[in-house]
Amino acid sequence: MSLYSKRGVSAQKEEVHRATQGLDPGLYPEAFCKIYPDYLCNDSNWVNIMHADGAGTKSILAYLYWRETGDLSVWRGIAQDAIVMNLDDLLCVGVTSPLLFSSTIDRNKRLIPAEVLEAVIEGTRDFFASMRPYGIDIHYLGGETADVGDLVRTITVNGTMTARWPKAKLITNQKIEPGDVIVGLASFGKTVYESAYNSGLASNGLTSARHDSLHKTYGARFPESYDNGLDESVVYIGPHQLSDTITINEQAVSIGHLLLSPTRTFAPVLATFIKEHFESIHGLVHCSGGGQTKCLKYLPGPLRIVKDNLFTPPPVFDLIQKASGADAREMYQVFNMGTRMEIYTTEANAQPLIELARAFGVEAQVIGRVEQAASKSLEIATGAERLQF
């Protein structure tokens, strides 16, 4: 059993899927988000889409960093994490704007003061403002902020995003077919719409990243930051302090900043893709929970996915792997490993998409291909190793 599993979490969310398997899968079961008839206006040419997600346990990392440094700005990044985990999922079905967003913040009032709430809310507003020049129009409709210390040890930051969208402009993954290539968008580096280097970690696998990377002293100093029922052998077992640094591009970057890099949105890139190259896009997959195996859930038939040209994982994943001792199979199931968005298209259309992404400062390349097969399967090449799923 992996350390990830011993902490009571699963990259594949098997129990969650079993609990929800009886729910309506929507109009297009292979689409990245559930798509329903237009219940709001009862127009057969339109659909309703709603998505809920959040920053997950990354908010605990922000709590540790804030308690150590007093730097409130880290909470603005958590606001972005909660938004992007909704926004970029909706982009995968072709939705760009207008969008509606409602936030849900639960806090332990004894530990999380009003200043933290204000930083999260202001960070939400600022992110929306930063997207408007790129044609991403998101309306902030408030939400719920609750003091629930009996339920929440520190704070959770989540959100719900919804849209009404024309059927003719949906991306449902039903067009993915043998012969397609996969254009990957890098999760790391610095885009033209980011102000600093992004480690690429995003908002998945943070339970593993936190406990495997950070030193045991964090558990002793901040017992409210983890489930006290866990075996101590899996709690904060890493070698690092948040203030430790590593060198990236000849610059010293702290472990705290690497782990807390705000989840990169691909909205400016994908909105342009969808506007200018809609017919070229056969499918979109956001490599979030489940990492590089996420695509297996959204294939329209018995297809084989081969990923043999993924980006070299950026330093944050090497740091986590060395600290945890996890093998390549677990790393690629839990983390995006530096490639977080997949565009399924024809070989002829790949290069224009790559060039467009690079114009935004997002590194892009063909990372793999789609082959005919007897059943759904995935092969990932990681250097000399070839992982089969």
Image (tube, rainbow, N blue to C red):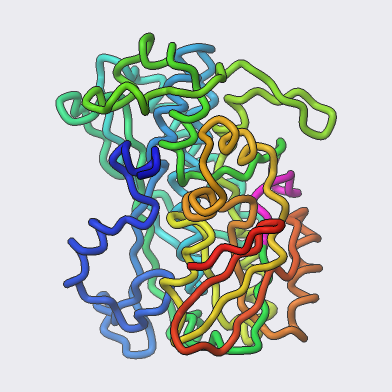
Magenta region: which residues?
A: 185-194
Name the one closer to the observer, 332 or 222. 332
Residue 193 on the magenta span: yes
Res 372 → quadrant: bottom right
Q: Tell me where residue 145 appears, x and y as whole percent.
A: 27, 35
Q: Please, what is the dominant secondary structure of the magenta stretch?
A: loop
Eyeballing the image, is 366 above or below 246? below
Q: Tell me where residue 50 appears, x and y as whole percent.
A: 33, 64
Eyeballing the image, is 171 above or below 271? below
Name the one closer to the observer, 89 or 14. 14
Q: Tell me where residue 5 appears, x and y as whole percent.
A: 34, 43
Residue at 22% in and 32% down: 146
Eyeballing the image, is 231 above or below 366? above
Q: In this view, does 189 lie to the left or right of 204?
A: right
Q: Tell me where residue 168 appears, x and y as whole percent.
A: 48, 88
Q: In this view, does 310 lie to the left or right of 90?
A: right
Eyeballing the image, is 124 above or below 343? above
Q: Is residue 94 left or right of residue 106?
A: right
Asked whether the viewer can see residue 142, the reply is: no
Asked whether the viewer can see residue 256, the reply is: yes
Query: Which quadrant holds the N terminus?
Result: top left
Q: Residue furthest right?
A: 250
